[in-house]
Image (spheres, rainbow, N blue to C red):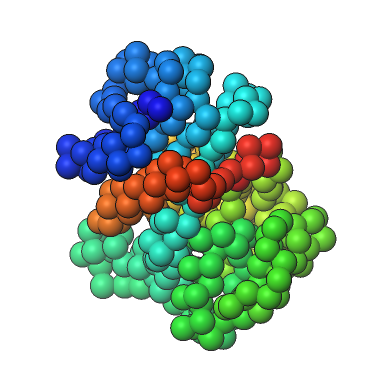
Amino acid sequence: MKILVHYAFTDEQVDELRTIATEYGHDLYYAADEAAAIEQVPGCECLLGLFNENVTRAGDQLRWIQSFSAGMDNFLYPEIIEREQVTVSNTAGLFAPQGGEHAWALLLALTRGIRLAVQNKGERAWAGGQVIELTGMTLGLIGLGGFGQETAKRARGYDMRVLGLDPVREAPMDDIDEIRTPHPDSLQWLLSSSDAVVVGCPRTPQTYHLLGADQLAQMKPTAYLICVSRGGIIDEPALIHALEEGLIAGAGLDVCEQEPLPADSPLWDTPNLILTPHRAGASQHRPRKIHEFFCDNLRRYLRGETPLNLVDKARGF
């Protein structure tokens, strides 16, 4: 069997993956760039790391792709969905702790006046604005995967009531007070009940522009909206209008529909909005975690076991 690694691993990390492949009698190759991947992928059964359409199109013998990403919206193009013989696994849950931390960082920056304090420091102004206490309030989570669960875990430290929407997780969960299946009525229930809403679901055809003008109007005018999963779930023009008109108190976006965010985007000038450049999944441990997960899942595949984190290509997660 021929295995191809196409990811920015160190030489030592590639050698460890190659050792695993050799133990099972297989050959592992490394591609440092797309051109090398396209050249080497023909005849490969496994592809670990990056996989754009040009690479997978050349991989006529592919059977398993291990993605470096948790979100699949940029990778499940029709060509890969339609190839029934190709299974895909992702890294869902691997970056959950830092995702939960980032959601809380954005929420606290908004509610504790940190955004304004940073601005005032540049102007040498000893002044502050409204400060909100979150303790005892209600948190709504759209998506109860890794990001949602880690956000909920941290909410317990604030004695918050936690509500959740999720299409597959319906049984009682630790740190979640009530879970409902996504539906217009249940979405309205969550939005109208929550003092803060955190979006942690994947972007799929079903969640694209899930939160538009009608949904933002269902939120409390004192509520905050945070998104740490994928751009495009929130309708950005509707969000801009809601913030400019004071329909919600503030928002924090780690992700945008177009990334990098263009310099002429009106989001830059939107009031009560904090933007971070898609960093919720980042940490000093990320490269190590990805490598360790790749090693473990490669061993599983080579032993004939089902890899962890198989993606439902039709559903998009």
- Res 55 quadrant in image: top left
Query: Is residue 224 at least partly visible in the picture?
Result: no
Q: Is residue 81 above or below residue 209?
A: above
Picture residue at 68% right of the left edge, 42% below the top: 315
Residue at (51, 61) in percent of width and height? 146
The percent position of residue 234, horizontal first and vertical second, equals 61, 47
Taking the image as shown, residue 203 lies to the left or right of residue 293, namely: right
Seen in the picture, residue 97 relative to 254 is either above or below; the reply is: below
The C terminus lies in quadrant = top right
Q: Which residue is found at the position 40% from the left and 27% from the top?
A: 1
Q: Is residue 96 above or below residue 264?
A: below
Q: Is residue 74 left or right of residue 1?
A: right
Indicate left or right for 273 with 115 as reference: right
Q: Position of residue 306 (x, y in %)?
A: 54, 47
- Residue 57 coordinates in the image, percent (x, y): 50, 16
Q: Position of residue 162 (x, y in %)?
A: 62, 76
Pick the front one: 187 or 99: 99
